[in-house]
Image: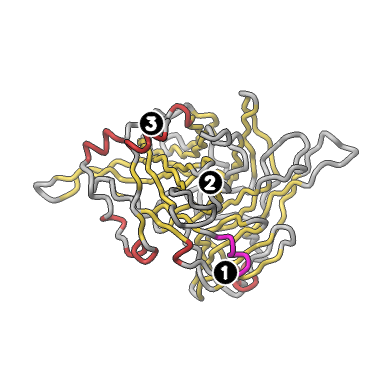
Amino acid sequence: MSGGMRRFLNLGLYDGHRRLYLLRRLDLSKTGFFHPTEEEAAAHGKVLPTLTPAKARATNRRRICNTQDLATADAAAPKIVPPKPELLMGPPQLSPCLDSHRFVHFFPTASESKVVLGDRGNRMLRFNVVDGSRYIDTLPCLHGVKKMPMAISVPPTDSHLPDGDDTGDLYIIDGLLHPDKAEVRPQFEALVWRGFKPSAISSRFWHCDILPLPPWISHHEHAMVFGHALVGGSICFSICGAEGAGTYCFHIATREWSKAGNWLMPFNGKADYVPELGLWFGVSNNLPCAADLSGIVGGEELSPNKMRIWNRDDLPEEWQPKSLHQPIAVSLGSGRFIIVDFLDAMKFNKEWNEMESVKEFALFTGMEVAYSNGESKGTMRGLRMMKHKSRRYMFSNQQRIEAVL
């Protein structure tokens, strides 16, 4: 493993039984998602088959899980013992008539030891783990409610925080946009650091800035943010609505937009850049995906030969994907990922051909992307995805995972 590998995953959960939001930290060194040596990985791992983009779009997600029996899958994916909560938080004291079932959101930062939390009252808190101690500090409030917030963490520069705080800036956009109402309800904002004043060295100066939406969609009544990726000094968003689809790039330094084209990136949600491979990785049509986005800011459309999609064909038919919860890909560094699938474990009565019971769980799987045959960085030739090990996180007491960061 590389020295830059992450050690923890931050899990944001909601406990409906106690009406509490929980933050748990999963220690990756104790869960064994990866084979420890290349020899063991070669012997016990599985190289996933590739799909063309057209075949991936046509794949029926409810029928790819049929090549392994349930007993074998259960044995290959032991249960995770949930770590103790690091933070318990009640929902904000707001009107229960608000049209949302989520009152607290969990956002990533550039550091695995920090998580930002935002509530429906637009208040922002930051949870920190420093030298074994836990504490919370406050950040500026957002200016408008985000019903389906998507957050992009931008790593700090060397001069960003002279006190060693490595949170970086946080850009938050509503996944469900109403561009025609942007003047009355801000839908794209940034929590940014603006440094110290010489006369107040102990004070930190965070600001929350309202940012414009792409001007090309300003007349739309509604639109959906399909996916996003940090590409150099720009944040690229794929947005689709009733009036068409497009990919737009927000340039952080100038705060201006450019249009890449009338097409969408292949990713659902976030795509992470892996510098060792020169590629971006995420989930496409619920399957692991890699793509070269390096030319997107200049308006270069992503061609099929600049992406790879891998099939998941080793799950039993009793493990059915949840239709309203997309898988999540979390980069650990050096081409390693955790893919989180949200599944229903269904028990069937084969004799009567009907379902008897359903139990929800999340399947955490260690994946590794690497080149074979000595191929060079930034190409698709020789790129392969290896599945290492899986673990099941079983839900109880009306719990659900809201975020994996």
Residue depicted at x 51% and y 66%: 302
1 or 3: tag closer to the N-terminus = 3
The magenta span reads: 293-300
Which one is earlier in the sequence, the residue at label 1 or at label 2?
Answer: 2
Extreme-front residue of the structure: 374
Picture coordinates of residue 49 (x, y %)?
Answer: 33, 53
Q: State the SS at label 2.
A: loop
Q: Which mark is residue 103?
A: 2
Label 2 packing within 10 angstroms: few (<14), some (14-19), many (20+): many
Residue 299 counted in the magenta span: yes
Q: Nearer the viewer, residue 321 or 353?
A: 321
- At a point 36% along the width and 56% down the height, the residue shown is 50
Task: Tell me the kind of residue under disc 2.
Answer: Phe
* Residue at point 40%, 51% (across, down): 325
Contact, CB < 8 Å: mark 1 with mark 2? no
Residue placed furthest toward the left: 351
Q: CA distance from mark 1 to mark 3?
A: 43 Å
Say what amino acid the circle numbered 3 marks.
Ile
**Which residue position holds label 3?**
80
Residue 395 visible within the image: no
* Colour convention: secondary structure
Query: Which element carries disc 3, helix, strand or loop?
Result: loop
Whole-number angstrom distance, CA of label 1 to CA of label 2: 39 Å
Q: Nearer the viewer, mark 1 or mark 2?
A: 1
Asked whether, in this view, residue 341 is left or right of residue 280, the answer is left
| Residue 300 circle label | 1
Does the segment drawn in magenta span residue 316? no
Rendered view: 172 above or below 8: below
Relative image position of residue 104 (x, y in whole percent): 54, 44
